Amino acid sequence: MATPDYILELRAKVGHDPLWLMSATAVVVRPSAARAGVREVLLAHRSDFLTWATVGGIIDPGEQPAIAAARELLEETGVVAEPETLAWVHVQDPAVYPNGDHVQFLDLTFRFRWVSGEPYPADGENLEARWFDEDRLPPLSDEMTGRVGHALAAGEVTRFEA
């Protein structure tokens, strides 16, 4: 699913004006099958910005954030995973989508443990979805590097932007 209906209804009223939204991100991790002691991270190659990114999306009204991240993960990649910890809470920089919509997100980034499924671009939002060894990630934006870095950090501590 691309854009939730309630966002489309808001856009019909406010046009391309900035919207403040909440998003949930799933940084999915599993042990590497090829390299002992190395973790793999699931990333998707986005069709809108043509960049590699973590998987996530808008939290629907009343939806629990970790459930939203799991839902987005399954919808976008066909992967089932379970949340382990809330890794990072932060406000993203304002962004403009290719269609001209202005947004800014409060993002909740979770580390997820892979359960089943091999990734593929399930809903058309991505061109590709696949695993990368944690030390062999493709080029990522500072935002995505932050998400992955916080999720891979040791422990169960949530990091907050000050």
Image (cartoon, rainbow, N blue to C red):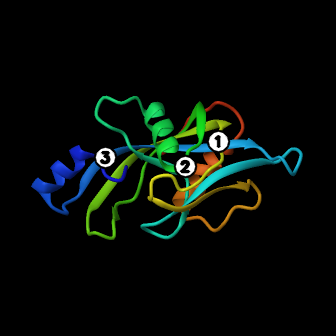
Please give the name of the residue rendered at 52% of the width and 58% of the height, measured from the top-left corner: 143
In what element is the residue under mark 2? helix
The amino acid pointed to by label 3 is Leu
Q: In the image, is residue 155 above or below residue 26?
A: above
The count of marks equals: 3
The amino acid pointed to by label 2 is Thr
In this rendering, would 130 be left or right of 136? left
Among the two numbered marks 2 and 3 on one chain, the one whose residue lies closer to the N terminus: 3
Please give the name of the residue rendered at 64% of the width and 30% of the height, measured from the top-left corner: 156
Q: Residues within 10 Å of mark 1 (few under 14, many from 20)?
A: few
Q: Residues within 10 Å of mark 3 (few under 14, many from 20)?
A: some
The percent coordinates of residue 92 (x first, y second) are: 41, 54
Q: Is 66 or 74 nearer to us in this picture? A: 74
Q: Residues within 10 Å of mark 2 (few under 14, many from 20)?
A: many
Residue corresponding to mark 3:
21
Residue corresponding to mark 1:
117
